[in-house]
Image (tube, grey):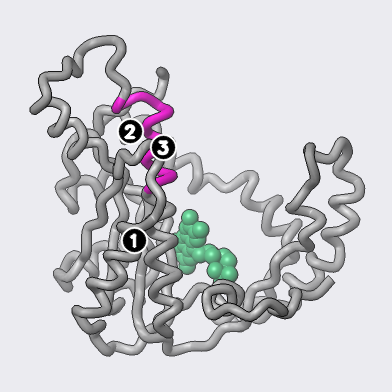
Amino acid sequence: MTMQANTIGSDTITTLMQRRSIRKFKPDPIDEGIVKQLEMAAQQAPSSEYLNDWSAVRITDPGLKDTLAAIAKQPYVAQVPLLYVFVSDESRNIAIIHNKGVDTSSSEFTLTASYRFAQAQNDTVLALSAMETAANALGLGCVILGSLLNDIDGLIDLLKLPKYTYPVLGLAIGKPDQSPMLKPRMPRSAQFFENAYPAGTGEMLADLKDFDQRVHEYYDLRDSDRPVDAYSDQTASKAVDQHVLQKAIGPAAARQGFRLDR
Ligand SMILES: Cc1cc2nc3c(=O)[nH]c(=O)nc-3n(C[C@H](O)[C@H](O)[C@H](O)COP(=O)(O)O)c2cc1C
């Protein structure tokens, strides 16, 4: 099954269907009016229980960009015109409730509980995604940077993140200086189900065969000399990826005051 053409006309849908990660940017700075618009689009994202429990740190210091590029092991990050680190943030809410006299030492206090942590991450990602879509709609390119979490403690220190905040993802934005192919997506039948999750995985695996081949044929500008592994091979190799273990969030979350055991 090939990627469905966009048959329903809407600028927003065209923007979403054309989106791809951009990892090479022109050096042109982004106009501050556009920056303001992007930030406001992020703020308009939905927020669970209206807690607004995220913040974003814009990185303008060239030295800091260099350091973040080194943490990410992605050198182009040092030259990205517009760079943010999105952060889950209960710090602001805790300051607000302190002002209201709420006892944060009580066992009923929840702003640092695991559900709140997940809730804040959801809000953070939705805000980042809204900014990405807004940037794409204006002809800008973006890449999300989970690689900043290669050194979670270092990132917390560098950005002086207070207790009850937690770094989630970076977002790099700029005018695209490359035009990569759209990366294939799996057939809808393998990802969208009706009423219940399918009982067996046999049909799903059969549906993924053609997709595997298309991923293998995909031309990745990140490393054009190396053929891209089929999706199944990529997924299998990630299942035993030691880097993921190094990025364990438990200790850093505890350091930031979150209690993921409750
Ligand atoms: C949470 C998240 C973290 C990501 N982190 C990185 C990253 O650190 N470096 C990178 O080059 N791409 C990163 N990406 C981009 C993915 O590699 C990319 O979205 C995926 O391969 C699909 O390609 P496409 O965005 O071009 O469709 C990240 C994407 C997500 C959603």
Q: Is residue 82 above or below residue 234?
A: below
Q: Quadrant of residue 174?
A: bottom left
Frontmost residue, 241 versus 169: 169
- Which residue lies under the disc numbered 1? 42
Q: Amino acid at mark 1?
A: Ala
Secondary structure mostly taken by the magenta-highlighted segment of the chain: helix
Q: Is residue 129 above or below residue 118?
A: below
SS category of the residue bearing label 1: helix
The Cα–Cα distance between marks 1 and 2, rounded to whole angstroms, is 24 Å
In the image, 97: left or right of 123?
A: left
Instruction: Please give the range of residues in magenta.
Output: 111-123
- Which residue lies under the disc numbered 3? 119
SS category of the residue bearing label 3: helix
Structural crowding at the residue carrying mark 2, measured as other residues with C-alpha within 10 Å and reported as few (<14), some (14–19) or many (≥20): many
- Which residue lies under the disc numbered 2? 253
Frontmost residue, 99 versus 221: 99
Mark 3 or 1, nearer chain start: 1
Residue at 39% across, 55% down: 45
Residue 56 position in % (x across, y down): 26, 56
Residue 193 position in % (x across, y down): 78, 47
